[in-house]
Image (tube, grey):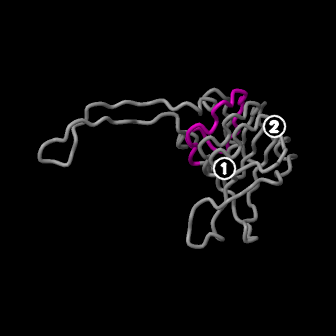
Amino acid sequence: MNYNEYKEVILNTPVSEGLEYNIAVAWVHPQEIPLRVVSRNGCTDKVIHIPETALNRWGLERPVMGIGKLAFKDCTDITDIILGSYVEILGSGAFSGCTALERIVIPKGLRRINKEAFAGCTALSDIYYGGTPEEWERITIHLEKHEYEYGELIPGTPVQKLTGERIIRIPGNEALKLANIHFHCIL
């Protein structure tokens, strides 16, 4: 679906109610910390619209900056995800097993997609991204890791001899490579 058609869906979809949030990082003043979605928590929406901000446990409104590890794992009825503009990180396995997920709106500020975030998302066909192709390339998407193998210690130094080097493919985010990416999708 092209972005102009899909824009109507985005604009007419209310923010999802009932999602569970937690603080995004540990800090001295946790009431001031941004939030992340940690579970669906009974929300039955098929189109999940992550809000820009949410109330923390102290009743203060804070930006939603992430989707936590396994937050929507195996939610097989979700067809669309609309991320709020403050979301920067998608946790490991965040949408894994969402077999009906067809479309996702990703804000320009997204910085990292952790391993297996989209594992098993076989229906994912369209990604609507707020930035440019160059900005998309700067997102850290965990598809592989670089590994070194060290052998014996080099005498007289604290260094070990490098005996092997390889890139290991990490399964789980292939769906991102197979989907159509629409750029400059700004609301």
Q: Is the magenta stretch mostly helix, strand or loop?
A: loop
Viewer-nearest residue: 148 or 178? 148
* Kind of residue indicated by mark 2: Tyr
**Which residue is labeled 2 in the image?**
6
Q: Is residue 15 above or below residue 46?
A: below
Please identify, in this view, whether the residue under mark 2 or under mark 1 is nearer the observer: 1
Name the quadrant containing residue 164.
top left
Q: Which of marks 2 and 1 is nearer the N terminus?
A: 2
Measuring 66% from the left and 36% from the top, which residue is drawn there? 96
Measuring 66% from the left and 71% from the top, which residue is drawn there? 31
152 relative position to 121: left or right: left
Q: Position of residue 64 (x, y in %)?
A: 69, 57
- The quadrant of the picture occupied by the N terminus is top right
Q: Are marks 2 and 1 in contact (CB under 8 Å)?
A: no
Measuring 81% from the left and 44% from the top, which residue is drawn there? 10
**Which residue is labeled 1 in the image?**
67
Q: Distance between the residues labelled 2 and 1?
A: 22 Å
Q: In this view, does 58 lie above or below 19?
A: below
Q: Where is residue 12 in the image (x, y as percent from the top left)?
A: 88, 46
SS at mark 1?
Answer: strand
Residue interval drawn in magenta: 111-135
37 relative position to 18: left or right: left
The answer to if 112 sits in the magenta stretch is yes
Is disc 2 surrounded by few (<14), some (14 to 19) or many (20+) residues within 10 Å?
Answer: few
Name the quadrant containing residue 167.
top left
Is disc 1 surrounded by few (<14), some (14 to 19) or many (20+) residues within 10 Å?
Answer: many
* Kind of residue indicated by mark 1: Ile
- Determine which of the numbered discs, if any, sits on residue 1 in the image: none
Q: Where is residue 103 in the image (x, y as percent from the top left)?
A: 74, 35
Q: Position of residue 16 (x, y in %)?
A: 82, 51
